Amino acid sequence: MKSVNAAHQLSAAAASRAIADGKLTCEALTASCLERIAAREGEVQAWACVDPAQALAAARAIDKLPRRSRIHGIPVGIKDVIDTHDMPTEYGSPIYKGNVPACDAACVAQIRELGGLILGKTVSTEFATRHPNKTRHPLNPLRSPGGSSSGSAAAVADFMVPVALGTQTSSSIIRPAAYCGVVGFKPSFGLINRAGLKFLAESLDTIGILARTVPDAALILEELTGLPPMRFGGNCNTRPRVGLCRTPWWGEADDATRENIERAAHKLAAAGALVTELVLDPGFGELNRIQTEISSYEFFRALSFERTRHPELISASLTSRIAAGGKITRDQYAAGCAAADRGRAQIADAFRDYDVLLAPSTRGEAPTIDSTGDPTFGLLWTLLRLPCLTVPFGHGPLGLPLGVQLIGAADRDRSLLAHAEWSRQVLQA
């Protein structure tokens, strides 16, 4: 058992076991996280709101309760587009400065009900789009942690909190997880209840998890959804059927990323996975554009109050995207939705031959701080509403983390998590 001062280094699963065994308290774990935040927040700037006195008082109250679940006593960061009744929720925008919602989002209320601790709100980009906010990369302050779940990825990577919730509309969990070297898990669409999430694109927005381990991501998912607990043991001989999917945008990845994916495929095959190449039908090449059209049409409407009442407080980049969304007709939108439905049916057929697909998470390592990175390698899978997970693997030319993306069949999240943990063990051996 680590000392209290190092408790923030524990995984959520390890901390859960220690609390259950009486070797650790929620107060001690929270205090350790807060010490880490105090030491590092000035450089990383991962938090939109954290109140140490409030967090410690909540931790002491949790320690007096009987154990309620496996996340009892575990601190969780909440992306600042998800409502909390006792902390500001500002959606990454000056329009909502000081805004405190009347109630918690459903997932936040569940975490509290299960005995988890809401440590604070992690920084989001503006309305979970691409305009950068204040968060810096934990390993290099001149680099971006990605977006839009910037603070969640950076806080988890920097050991400020064991797990955090994020959201994804295009690549907002997968991309920052890869840049920061953590596990990013976007579940199947709608698996985690979205009540109390500030919608950007209601047919795409998905709540997911940033964590340091695959079992930690599974733990949070299971407790929030009622899925049965998984057993993660040693390196099991699952021999997953892996589809190496370079995607139509393979040429847009940098050399280091392409080499990293090929190396990952080789290592998985050498360990017993059945790796074959999956070449997508040419029609899939249109789906990134269609994802952009659908999301733009939806967030033009979702942000109607903000764009009509406070246009001067919206960034130029988002203003441009909103304007583009206003030009998309209902017929174009309906055609895009129909194409997405066809793509979902086609990819379901492909998964008859594969357990998971292997694809890039990003174009390369973390970009400079004036950008949150390119979402190219997340758009397709988010549009298809598939569960996706980034596993840290490899490094770019600057020594910053790279990740590989594993994609599962719709609603087969537990299968994806199991194969992702097997893959992680192989890749990081």
Image: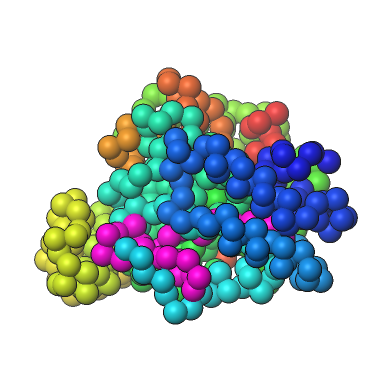
**Picture quarter with the N terminus:** top right
Q: Magenta includes 90?
A: yes
Instruction: Out of 151 and 371, give the one closest to the viewer.
Output: 151
What's the magenta bit mostly, secondary-structure-wise?
loop
- Residue 113: % across, % down: 66, 74
Residue at x 42% of width, y 65% of height: 88
- Residue 286: % across, % down: 27, 53
Instruction: Out of 74 and 238, give the one closest to the viewer.
Output: 74
Left or right of 351 on screen, residue 374: left
Residue at x 49% of width, y 50% of height: 152
Left or right of 422 on screen, residue 391: left
Q: Magenta includes 269?
A: no
- Residue 60: % across, % down: 72, 63
Residue at x 57% of width, y 65% of height: 411
- Residue 107: % across, % down: 55, 70
Q: Residue furthest right?
A: 21
Residue at x 87% of width, y 55% of height: 22
Up the image or down, 130 lies above or below 224; here it is above
Left or right of 393 on screen, residue 56: right
Quadrant position of residue 351 = bottom right
Q: Is residue 333 visible?
A: no
Q: Which residues are magenta?
A: 73-96
Q: Residue furthest front?
A: 53
